[in-house]
Amino acid sequence: MTGSICGTGSYIPHYAMDNNAVADLVETSDEWIRERTGVIRRHIITEETTTSMAAEAGRRALEDAGLPAEEIDLILVATISSDALLPCTACEVQKTLGAVNATCFDLGGAACTGFVLAYNTAEAYLASGVYKTALIIGSESLSALTNWKDRGTCILFGDGAGAAVLKASEQRRYLPVTHSEGAKGEALVCKSRYDSNGLTKKCNECIPEEKYFIRMDGQAVFKFAVRKVPEVIEEVLEKNSLSKEDIDLYILHQANKRIVEAVAKRLGEPMEKFPVNVQEYGNTSSASIPILLDELNGAGKLKPGQKLLLAGFGAGLTWGASVLGTAET
Ligand code: UT7
């Protein structure tokens, strides 16, 4: 038993912010951003929220799967930018969609590896027979965590949501490989906005505001990604007795076009097997893989019987790769 994807959906905020608009805020240029990241524009929330985007992406995925909301047993939302601590985003999605029979929880803090971990979690539930259907979502309003005065980060990130519906199936099960290295976590941090208890700890006033935004040692994260992602891809292939030739598409977290290119080069695989859409959305953390999946699905590029390899990497530091087969019917 495993969990097979039988529907996808996404939601992209209406407001598209191009590189020139970013260059109005910090000292940078359209040319620099394109060359160093591949990003041309990103979409930024206006009236949307992390919850509303998650719910709409989820609704579209259910529609694509042809499944009524009441038939969903599990809703997982991967996000580092939830609108509230309580209730969790997954419960809010349940309420909006009327998925009254679902168990719901968020995977917070897993950041850019979040969707891969959500897939692994849901797949394990389905494979073990606990649940039969799952809705997994990555949704991010990174614009709220971005320091729009820091050119090292604000050029990169964007907002959006993507979702996939999984159904228990008799297809072959592939085991994932995941890693974490907390000792290197300083490379990508964002302090909690709730670090005072109002009783024994002083309130936030003494802490510089910048700490509440994402801070990143871009070069360190870049080097980590181009080394560890090819390694974990090789590991997951070996674990499942697969070769690179068996993989039809590598769906990588869209952090930076140069990272995807470097991974393809290290693996000796053609770029045609590595779809890229960072140019349109920027880096949307946990949402980037399901947005890409939905784009490929919408374009008719996901065919029955394909093997897809998902790979995520980011804050923690965390990284991992999973193989899944597309539905065979
Ligand atoms: O989502 C998962 C986690 N995140 C990532 O995977 C992101 C990984 N890192 C990156 O994508 C890249 O490191 C960045 C896009 C963030 C930065 O690109 P880079 O090629 O690593 O730039 P850099 O920090 O090495 O800076 C190169 C030069 C420096 O100038 P000098 O010292 O060579 O004169 C910087 O001061 O570019 C300068 N620079 C900029 N110039 C114009 C840095 N940021 C900018 C900028 N605009 N926005």
Image (cartoon, rainbow, N blue to C red):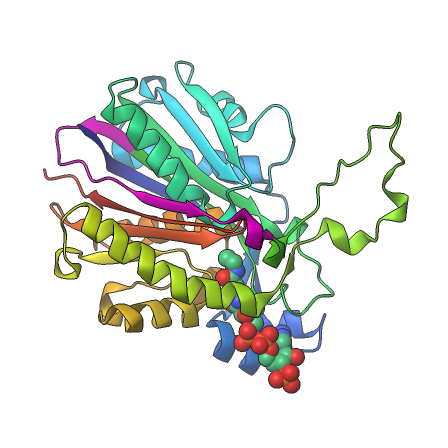
Residue at image x 21%, y 46%?
Answer: 239
69 vs 240, nearest the viewer = 240
105 sits left or right of 120 in the view: right
- Picture quarter with the C terminus: top left
Q: Nearer the viewer, residue 297 or 267?
A: 267
Magenta stretch, residue numbers: 166-185
Q: Position of residue 97 (x, y in %)?
A: 44, 24
Which quarter is ligand 1 in?
bottom right
Q: Is residue 294 above or below residue 262?
A: above
- Work out whether 313 lies above or below 56: below
User: Relative to 60, is 282 above or below?
Assistant: below
Report if residue 173 lies within the magenta region: yes
Please indicate whether residue 164 sits to the left or right of residue 317 in the image.
left
Look at the image and say whether residue 263 sits in the magenta stretch.
no
Q: Name the residue at 74% across, 40% down.
A: 193
The x and y percentages for residue 231 are 32, 59
Q: Which quadrant of the view contains residue 88?
A: top right
In the rendered structure, the answer to whether residue 251 lies left or right of residue 43 reads: left
The percent position of residue 28, horizontal first and vertical second, equals 65, 78
Q: Residue furthest top?
A: 101
